[in-house]
Image (cartoon, rainbow, N blue to C red):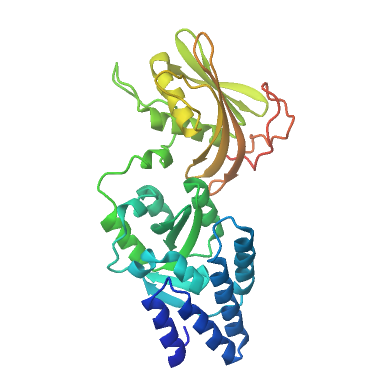
């Protein structure tokens, strides 16, 4: 931020009442009077953001005002570091003051509400070195040492299925939050994003023991991404359920699932794909789901077809983005109207190793 006493006083007025647009509009007038291009851009940004705030989300006029603000944001050079507790309470007010990439938060001594923090599972927070610090509607505000990392932002948006806004924070302070504020036991959400390294779907078990269904389903989906498969089929037979993948236009038998576990597997897939189900309503129909692993982000279409012997499950990979480990040279790049046995498959990204 500028060290000019008038500018400092005007920003302090904003900090005293972040939700009041008057201090921001007074600041905009003062910035215009400086005659500097970067200050004129900041003034235009402030006024456009104030105008947008008068319209509800989804309104055309609001969208126009936000796009105008974004067009000025690139020329804004002022920066501000704010206490994390203050930002947590008023995240959008701070975005109305400055573009997100010009803001930084100080997390020392900051306590993040558990419901906000645990939106990001601990394993993801550690591997990505990020913490969720605030939220509003479907927008998640996330502290990171590198807000310019667009690949990381895209990855988190895909995993969380929310709009993500990055705000700069010190790496050591992020680490301290992760170490001190996550609960000792991982949340249920953790299971959705933690996929074990696969050496086959089923670990060694004592007779009569069953593997947990959620990690089994996660591993099954992750294995399809490792293979570069565009289709996955679960086909029930009287004694077992057969799993096979379609890789390079060839159906590859892969594993079997005990019949006693199959209802829970199908129910889990139905939940992930938001296919209606209930005590008196077996899963049936189709839906889509997103899956994030340590090496890929993918979207799948799930179709569950009731049969006398049990539900037949088709899972089609609609899209995939690989990162970190690369892509398999034996995978298939699909095209609409391809050779899949259930019709064509949608174009997909580069398959993985």
x 48%, y 22%: residue: 283
Q: Is residue 130 visible?
A: no
| Quadrant of image for the C terminus | top right
Compared to residue 89, the image places residue 14 above or below, namely below
Whether residue 274 is situated above or below residue 165 in the rendered picture? above
Residue 126 in the figure: left or right of residue 55:
left
Residue at the (54%, 71%) spot, across then down: 50
| Nearer to the camera, 177 or 82 | 82
- In terms of image quadrants, where is residue 74? bottom right
Q: Residue furthest right?
A: 337
Q: Residue at x 26, y 44 (%)?
A: 185
Name the spot of residue 274 as percent of width and height, x first: 49, 33
Total marks in image: 0
Q: Quadrant of residue 75?
A: bottom right
**Nearest the camera: 9 or 238?**
9
Q: Is residue 292 left or right of residue 339?
A: left
In this view of the protein, can residue 303 be seen by the observer?
yes
Image spot of residue 266 (x, y percent): 46, 23
Find residue 1 and report its horizontal and vertical position in percent: 46, 83
């Amino acid at each position: 931020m500028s060290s000019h006493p008038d500018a400092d006083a005007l920003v302090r007025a904003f900090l005293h009442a972040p939700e009041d647009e008057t201090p921001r509009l007074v600041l905009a007038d003062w910035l215009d009077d400086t005659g500097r291009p970067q200050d004129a851009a900041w003034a235009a940004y402030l006024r456009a953001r104030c105008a947008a705030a008068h319209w509800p989300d989804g309104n055309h006029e609001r969208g126009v005002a936000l796009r105008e603000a974004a067009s000025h944001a690139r020329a804004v050079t002022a920066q501000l570091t704010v206490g994390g507790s203050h930002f947590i309470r008023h995240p959008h007010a701070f975005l109305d003051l400055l573009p997100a990439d010009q803001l930084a938060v100080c997390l020392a001594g900051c306590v993040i509400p558990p419901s906000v923090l645990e939106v990001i599972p601990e394993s993801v927070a550690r591997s990505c070195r990020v913490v969720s610090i605030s939220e509003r509607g479907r927008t998640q505000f996330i502290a990171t040492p590198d807000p310019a990392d667009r690949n990381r932002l895209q990855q988190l948006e895909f995993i969380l299925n929310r709009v993500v806004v990055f705000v700069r924070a010190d790496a050591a302070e992020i680490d301290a939050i992760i170490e001190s504020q996550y609960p000792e036991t991982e949340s249920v959400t953790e299971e959705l994003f933690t996929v074990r390294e696969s050496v086959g779907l089923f670990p060694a078990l004592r007779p009569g023991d069953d593997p947990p269904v959620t990690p089994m389903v996660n591993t099954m989906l992750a294995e399809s991404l490792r293979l570069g498969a565009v289709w996955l089929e679960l086909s029930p037979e009287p004694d077992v359920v057969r799993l096979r993948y379609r890789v390079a236009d060839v159906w590859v038998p892969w594993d079997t699932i005990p019949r006693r576990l199959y209802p829970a597997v199908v129910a889990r897939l139905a939940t992930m794909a938001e296919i209606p189900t209930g005590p008196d309503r077996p899963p049936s129909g189709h839906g889509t789901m997103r899956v994030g692993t340590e090496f890929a982000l993918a979207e799948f279409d799930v179709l569950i077809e009731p049969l006398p012997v049990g539900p037949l499950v088709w899972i089609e990979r609609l899209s995939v983005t690989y990162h970190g480990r690369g892509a398999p040279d034996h995978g298939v790049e699909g095209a609409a109207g391809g050779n899949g046995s259930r019709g064509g498959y949608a174009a997909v990204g580069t398959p993985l190793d």
